[in-house]
Every structure is written in structure tokens, then in C-alpha cells.
Amino acid sequence: MLEPEITQNTGPDGRTLKRVGIGAAVVAVALVGFGIASRINATSDLEQVAAKASVPTVTVVSPTSGEGGEGLVLPGSIQAYNSAAINARTNGYVRRWLADIGDRVQAGQTLAILDAPEIDQQLAQARADYQTALANQRLAATTSRRWQSMLAQDAVSQQEADEKAGDLAAKTALANASLASVRELNAKQGFTRLAAPFSGVVTSRSAQIGALVVAGNAATQPLFTVSDVHRMRIYVRVPQVYSSQVRPGMQATLSLPEFPGRSFTASLTRSANSVDAQSGAMLVELQADNGEGALKPGAYAHVKFPIDGAGTGLRLPGSAILSAEDGPSVAVVGGDGRVTLRRVTIARDEGKSVLVSVGVKPGDKVIDSPPDSIATGDRVQIAAPEKGAKPNG
């Protein structure tokens, strides 16, 4: 009788393998789906970041009232009443300089002395030539007188006497020419002494002992500059809109940054009576006494004119103005975040701020320091105000 075969199970059956395969496929699908979802989310985040980055963030300011007191305040340039650059009129070397910057000098006071050996030798030669010409003139004069005496006795002809008189005239002309050369070289020798043309203060010195100076070279720096500062001139450019309200005799006040709380009185002396085509302003000159020496040449000052209605308008920072060929404009942000460029009329430019008479109104959100490429319709986002910052307007 045959015994039944006994089979040994050496591995998982087909059903188990199928289940494992299905599970692995599910896991793989889940992993692929998770990866795709992660990539989609990352792409969406990048798109949001890119979209957000494409909208520039800007800082805005609001126009403020331009009324800040009566009068028109404009920048002015202070200049000396008289100023002279002292240059050499002859070639030479600096032997000594006798005045330095800040020194007060009187008219005719010596500032420096030059050595000019060539001029000295030329002068000596010219004096010797003059003495020779004088000797020849004296001899010709004696000869002419003798021939005139002999002509009276019919001892010589009229032609010979005329020749001697003509020789005397020629020798006299040569003597005069030699004398002119001597005087010219004397004058050049006198130019080796540099003197102050008027009383004032030495405001610059470039003379150095032993340095060569060349006359007639316009590119060289002046050896000295002397300024008369007993009275100062102040030059101001007045905008055309106010040009009819300034006139000679008007009193104005000056304020300088180095003297806070102090003012100086100046009087308008003259006006150009012409509006500059580039700046749109008229140049005027004021003068102020400077007995104390507080006003300095080249300094900057605020000049206040007593003009009515000079404070009307709205004030904006100068950095908010866009300059273009068709005139100044500002970029205003609307409620939808869109930009609108508006033409404005500047009533007064005060440097850091400008007074705008037309183009903006209170409450407008004007972009401060807008990019030159900004255009109407661009979308922007307004930056959050800094903590502790005072609101504009």
C-alpha cells in the first residue's frame, strides 16, 4: 500500500505575494502623490513669492500745509564786496612771502617778493644802451650846432648842414627808445613785489619759497587772493512768480547755520531784471555790513524776503518730485494700489522741500523717492511705517 506524499511549504503563497505587491504599489503611489503635491505646493509658493516681489514696496508721504510764517525764504550765496586774485606779472622765483591766509592787509602792503635775475640783467643792459644813445645824441647835437655855424659863414653847404641835423634827430629818437626800454624793465622789476590792491583779508595763498612763477599763465593758481569783507554781497535767485514783488531798497534778513537763532539785516541793491531761461528765476543782489566779520565769502545763507502770500500751497519733500522734459510731476498711489503720475507746479524750491501750488491735495499718498521708471498704472504696495516714526503731515 502506497503512502501519501507529504509536501513542504517553503515560502509564501501567491495570495500573500499579491497582497504584498498591492501594498507596495499603494505605498509607491502615495509617495509619488506626496512628491507631486509637495512640488505643486512649492511651485505655488514660488509663484506667490515672485508675484509679491514683482510689486515694489514704496514709502509714501502726505502733503503738508505750506504756511510756516510770513515771507519768502530762499537760499543765497555770500560773496566778498571786492575780491582780487594776485598773480605774477613777471617770471621769477619766490624769495619771501609776507602774508598768510586770515591776515588783514592794507592797500599797497607787500605780500611777497620775487627774485627775477633775468630782469635785473636786462635792466642793466638797457641802462648801458641808454647811456650810449645819450652820448651819441650829445655828439650829434654838438656836430649839428657847428655845421649850422659854418653854414652861416658859407663854409659848408646847406645839404651837409641838413644831414647833420637829421643825424641829431635820429640819435635823439634812439635815445628816447632806449629810455622807454629802461622804463619798461623798471616796471617789470617793480612787479617782483606783489602788493595788496586794497585793504582786506588774505583768503588764499599758494606762494611757496623757491617756487618758480610764470607770468601770463592763466592755468596757474593765483599766488594770493585778497577779499574786501567790510561789506558783503549776497546773491539770490528769486522765482519768476515772486520777481515782481522784489525791488531795490527792500530789507531782508539772513540766517546762517553757524549762528542759530541770530539774524543779519541786508538791503536789496540791484536786480538783473531778467529771468534765466534754465532756472526760471531772477538774480538779485543784496548787501550787508560786516563790521564784526561774521559773514564769510563763499558761505551759504537763508534769505527771508517780506513778501505777502509766499506761504500758500502744500509742502512736499524735494525727493518726491520727478523731473521730466515736460515738467515736474509726482507719483500718487490710489486706493487700489495703482500709481498715477500728476503734473505739479512748484511755487518755491527750498532745497530739502518744495512748495507745490497745483497738482496735489491734502491726504494724497505721494511716493517718496520714486524710481525714474515708474509709470501710470503700475501696481505698488505701501511699506508699513517704522515704529516710532512720526506720521508725515
Image: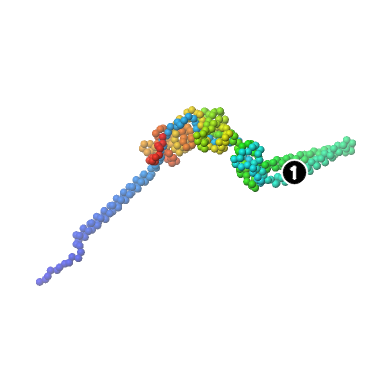
Q: Position of residue 307 (x, y in %)?
A: 50, 28
The C terminus is located in which quarter? top left
Looking at the rendered image, the quarter that the N terminus falls into is bottom left
Q: Nearer the viewer, residue 227 or 325?
A: 227
**Residue 82, picture quadrant:** top right
Q: Looking at the picture, how far across and down is residue 337, in whole percent? A: 37, 38
Furthest residue to the left?
A: 1
Three-letter code, disc 1 = Ala
Instruction: Report the number of discs.
Output: 1
Does residue 43 appear in the picture of this structure?
yes
* Residue 207 left/right relative to 245: right
Q: 50 left or right of 215?
A: left
The residue located at (48%, 35%) in the rendering is 350
> Disc 1 marks which residue?
126
Tell me, yes or no, if residue 272 can be seen here. Answer: no
Query: Which sits in the foreground, 144 or 376?
Result: 144
The residue closer to the viewer here, 138 or 336, is 138
Q: Residue at 33% across / 49% down in the picture?
A: 43
Q: Is residue 344 left or right of residue 90?
A: left
